[in-house]
Structures are given as C-alpha cells and as structure tokens.
Amino acid sequence: MIHVSATPVLALRGVSKRFGAVQALTDVDLEIHAGEVVALVGDNGAGKSTLVKTISGVHPIDEGAIEWEGREVRIGRPHDAQHLGVATVYQDLALCDNLDVVANLFLGSELKSASVLDEIKMEKRARVLLDTLSIRIPSVRIPVAALSGGQRQVVAIARALVGDPKVVILDEPTAALGVEQTAQVLDLVERLRERGHGVILISHNMADVQAVADRVAVLRLGRNNGVFRVADTSPEEVIAAITGATDNAVTRRRARTATATKEGAK
Ligand SMILES: Nc1ncnc2c1ncn2[C@@H]1O[C@H](COP(=O)(O)OP(=O)(O)OP(=O)(O)O)[C@@H](O)[C@H]1O
Ligand SMILES: [Mg+2]
C-alpha cells in the first residue's frame, strides 16, 4: 500500500521546451507526490535530462505550467528551485575528492559561528544525517577519494538532503555501480520515500525501477508515452512504451488508469 498525499508536491502541466530547431519537450505532464518514487525513463534523447533541468531551473520552460503544492510557480533559475525545496543530484557527482565527507556535505552551505567554520557542529550534523539515512561510512573525516563508488553516490545524495528538500531528483544514480553498491543506493532511495520526500529517479535499469519506484513515467521523443504503476506493470510493457512498440491506444489507456487511481485517492 502506497501512502501518498492527494495534492502532488510538484506537477508539470503541458510543459514544452525547445532548443532552437530541436523540440526537446512537447506538452509533458508529470506529478510527484510526497513519499513517492517516480521513475523517469525513456531512450537516449527522449528528454529526461531536459525535463529535470526545467524543474531544477537550469532551462526554464517555454510553455505550460509548474505547480508546487497545488500553486503555480515560476522556476526561472536554479535558486528558485532550491528555494522551493528541489534538490538535484546530477550524474557527474561533483564531489571534491581531496575534501572529507563532512566538508563535501556542507560545501557551499558551511555552518559558521562568529564567521569561523564550525567544524564540530558540521561533523555532528553530518553524523546525524548519515545515521538517519543508515549510511555507513568508515569515517566522516576521510577524503571522499578513499570511498567506494557506492559510498560516494550515497554521500552525493546525502549532500542534496542538507537543505531538507521536499523533492529529490536523482539522475542515473546507479549507472556506474556494481550489484552491492546499487543495492546500497536503492536502499537509500527507499529511506527517502519513508521520510516523505518525493523522488524522481532517472534510470535506464528496469530492475532498479521495479525495485524502488511506485510509478514509472515514460518519455518518448519528448512526449509522455504512459505513466504506469510499477506494481501492476511488467518490465516488458514499460520497455515497449520506451521503444514505441506498444499500440499507443493501449499505452494511453494504461496511463489513464494510473492517473485515475491517483485521483481516486483524493
Ligand atoms: N542545451 C541544449 N541545446 C540544444 N539541444 C539540446 C540541449 N539539451 C538537450 N538538447 C536536445 O534535446 C533532446 C533531449 O535531450 P535530453 O538530454 O533531455 O535527453 P535524455 O532523455 O536525457 O537522453 P539520455 O538518456 O541520452 O541522457 C535531444 O535531442 C538533445 O539533443
Ligand atoms: Mg540525460
């Protein structure tokens, strides 16, 4: 049983985005509820990264609307998204190898007292944050260069949580990871849902999608091509929607069912 709020924390309504001659997104709808993991899938060039960048303020939308907790908002730059409570973890992790875990977590949002870095406070907060997320790391004072790929990924995700965002966007968080490290990251995604964050998970990996997502939204050639409830959809059906192999009428019917179920919860 999935417990989600009735009003989506974030909703995209008919969003379009063009880059010169390239129509990257056309009339795209997407809803994310608190305490829900929505996988965003689609072939290379389908528009996933562009969609995420419209939400995170990197590429403002051309048409359509973005709603935050039911109210229309304008996300014109990254600061607007952060201010609302959107945190994005990009694929290139952008951690500073030579800095330790604490310094990476608070990079750009350092805690100070009397204009001096408050290392003790930051270390304490870092431990609390990692503990609540059940993230185990040998020491918060080792440089991240000494961590495994999976540990680095969870540190990058933990860093996004320092500002306590309501929506967390993860762009291919397991793409470079082995089996055990992937499990560690997927565990963390589960924890984010338990804590009530809305999560958008971009993934090419159907096993990951099946393991943690509540719903999966398919983009194809910059348009919606179905939103499925993972519990009653096979990976083959999702893949068919990604490649365009399914009869579109079937896809649309499934998409309507997923939406109707959601609305029935209101
Ligand atoms: N800054 C940009 N300028 C021009 N075209 C762009 C820009 N960003 C994306 N595009 C184009 O928009 C389309 C969607 O690209 P996008 O990166 O969103 O796809 P994607 O689904 O993330 O693909 P992938 O799985 O390969 O990461 C592509 O045709 C791409 O070339
Ligand atoms: Mg991409």
Image (cartoon, grey):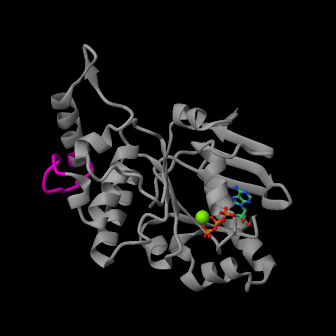
* Apparent side of residue 110 relative to residue 136 in the rendered image (left or right): right
The answer to whether residue 137 is visible is yes
What residue is shown at x 62% (from left), y 46% (from top)? 55
Quarter, ligand 2? bottom right
What residue is shown at x 62% (from left), y 59% (from top)? 49
Magenta stretch, main secondary structure, is loop
**Residue 55 is inside the magenta segment:** no
Where residue 266 appears, x then y in whole percent?
61, 47
* Apparent side of residue 212 relative to residue 14 in the rendered image (left or right): left
Where residue 171 appears, x then y in whole percent?
51, 60
Q: Residue furthest front?
A: 98
Where residue 210 appears, x then y in whole percent?
47, 74
Q: Residue furthest right?
A: 21
Where residue 220 appears, x then y in whole percent?
72, 71
* Apparent side of residue 206 relative to residue 252 in the rendered image (left or right): left
* Chain part drawn in magenta: 131-142
Q: Quadrant of the N terminus?
A: bottom left
Image-quadrant location for residue 38:
bottom right
The answer to whether residue 194 is visible is no
